[in-house]
Image: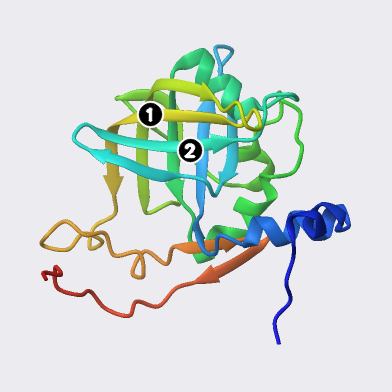
Amino acid sequence: MSTVFSRTGLDNLEKRHRVNLLNSLSGYKSANLLGSINSQDQTNLALMSSVFHIGANPPILGLLFRPHSVPRHSLENILETGVFTLNVVTQDMHAQAHQTTARYPQEQSEFIATGLEIEYSPVLKAPYVAQSPIKTGLRLVETQTLAVNDTVLVIAEIIEIRVDDGLISEDGQLDMNAAQAVAITGLDEYHTAATLGRLAYPKP
């Protein structure tokens, strides 16, 4: 037996039930903390599960923000300063990372609220999360507001990568298992992953 939802059926679901269903529908997503800062040097930290690879040459990532109809401190900081960081969330820090989703006022830094430590690089002004084993510094390239639902697409160029020792294989692959990286489904469920192994490049 299967449960079937029509398009009309989805619309008629209780709001929280529908949100949970649709947010978990795409399966496991990477968990990253987005570090940013504004021109008044107020730092911000926000959990993101919408980061995706766009290209390797030039090295570009994309991420999605919900509509900018209410204050979005991370997005506003990115638009103001043009730089931000992405920091892989690990098992040891996932509860602190989740706490960053609380609606703190702009003047209250999530770094201080959660006890996560700031690390700075001479390459960019935006703060890194010191506890994260894999950190990426990015510069804004462009934004697009999607007509379908006003979601904001941010496209950014990688300008720095900082990786703890022992997490890069000889061919450049990052070892997310050794990093103890976590994944997210929905809005509040966190997972550890076990590798099934790497397969050879497929040919017909």
Residue occupying image coordinates x 74% and y 55%: 7
Element type at mark 1: strand
- Against 105, is 27 above or below? below
Mark 2–mark 1 CB contact (< 8 Å):
yes
- Against 153, is 174 above or below? below
Q: Is residue 174 left or right of residue 23?
A: left
Residues packed near mark 2 inside 10 Å, few (<14), some (14 to 19) or many (20 plus)? some
Residue occupying image coordinates x 55% and y 70%: 191
* Residue 91 seen in the current view: yes
Q: Quadrant of the N terminus?
A: bottom right
Q: Find residue 27 and report its image quarter.
A: bottom right
Residue occupying image coordinates x 82% and y 52%: 11
Q: Nearer the viewer, residue 162 or 24?
A: 24
Colour mode of the rendering: rainbow
Q: Nearer the viewer, residue 25 or 133?
A: 25
Q: Please state the horizontal and vertical placement of residue 65, each as a whole percent of the image.
A: 59, 34
**Tag on residue 63?**
2
Q: Find residue 9 and report its image quarter.
A: bottom right
Q: Is residue 130 left or right of residue 26?
A: left
Q: Is residue 44 left or right of residue 55?
A: right
Q: Nearer the viewer, residue 12 or 100?
A: 12
* Disc 1 target residue: 156
Q: Nearer the viewer, residue 6 or 115?
A: 6
* First in residue order: circle 2 vs circle 1: 2
Q: Amino acid at mark 1?
A: Ala
Q: Amino acid at mark 2?
A: Leu
Element type at mark 2: strand
Q: CA distance from mark 2 to mark 1?
A: 9 Å
Residues packed near mark 1 inside 10 Å, few (<14), some (14 to 19) or many (20 plus)? many
- Against 7, is 3 above or below? below
